[in-house]
Amino acid sequence: MNHATTNSHLEVICGPMFAGKTTELMSRVAQAHAAGLRVLAVKPTRDTRYGHSELVTHTGLRIPALAVDRIADTLEHVHDFVAIDEIHFFADEAVAPIQALLARGTRVVVAGCDIDHFGEVFAPFDSLIPMAGTVTRIAGTCARCGAPSTHSERISAVTDRIIVGGIGDFHATCAACFRPSVRGIPLTP
């Protein structure tokens, strides 16, 4: 058996917005640092909500990160552990580079929203979850009833599938309270 593939491991952290996915990802980064691993934290370039070269939680925790346009841009870096935030921003383009990282023995942890505001599975989760050795699905709190949240409901009047948003753009809701967006119809705030 190839030594590189025996050390590789993919973990998927997923759930709706405001559930603590980035906080959980940062915890994995801290554990990898404590274990003496060479760590690379990655984020999409277009996520500029709180800073360009940092992973930042909605509560303000931050760690340094490499902003990339494509996950393939991480392949030139040699690390034992790669943590990728907002993986859904990369869609299916992320799958082959993650497979390449795993093939060379890199431990990979990804975090992001697995269900979009239409109620559909975000790529690349449909491909990554079956590959993962560990899947951690996190729930937040429903903004309407207080139950565990499972969905991100868009409340801003934008019809794009992916926007860089936060408080004021989305609510976390449970399945019973979730009102999916309708394609091509702007939301009424």
Image (spheres, rainbow, N blue to C red):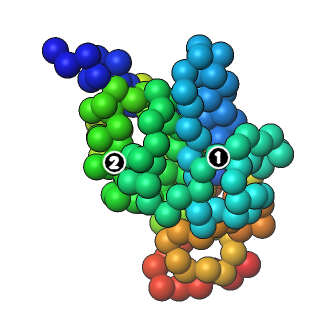
Picture coordinates of residue 149, whole percent (x, y): 63, 44
Q: Is residue 111 above or below residue 154?
A: above
Give how far apart the Cα atoms at labels 2 and 1 are: 18 Å
Q: Is residue 66 visible?
A: yes
Residue 3 in the image, given as x and y percentages of width and height: 26, 16
Residue 135 visible somewhere in the drawing? no
Q: Are marks 2 and 1 in contact (CB under 8 Å)?
A: no
In the shown orientation, is residue 20 left or right of residue 74? right
The residue carrying mark 2 is 97
The residue positioned 77% from the left and 42% from the top of the image is 62
Q: Quadrant of the N terminus?
A: top left
Relative depth, front residue between 44 and 186:
44
Residue 65 numbered tag:
1
The amino acid type of the residue labelled 1 equals Ala
The answer to which of 121 and 6 lies nearer the viewer is 6
Q: Which mark is residue 145?
A: none
The percent position of residue 120, horizontal first and vertical second, equals: 41, 59
Disc 1 secondary structure class = loop
Q: Amino acid at mark 2?
A: Pro
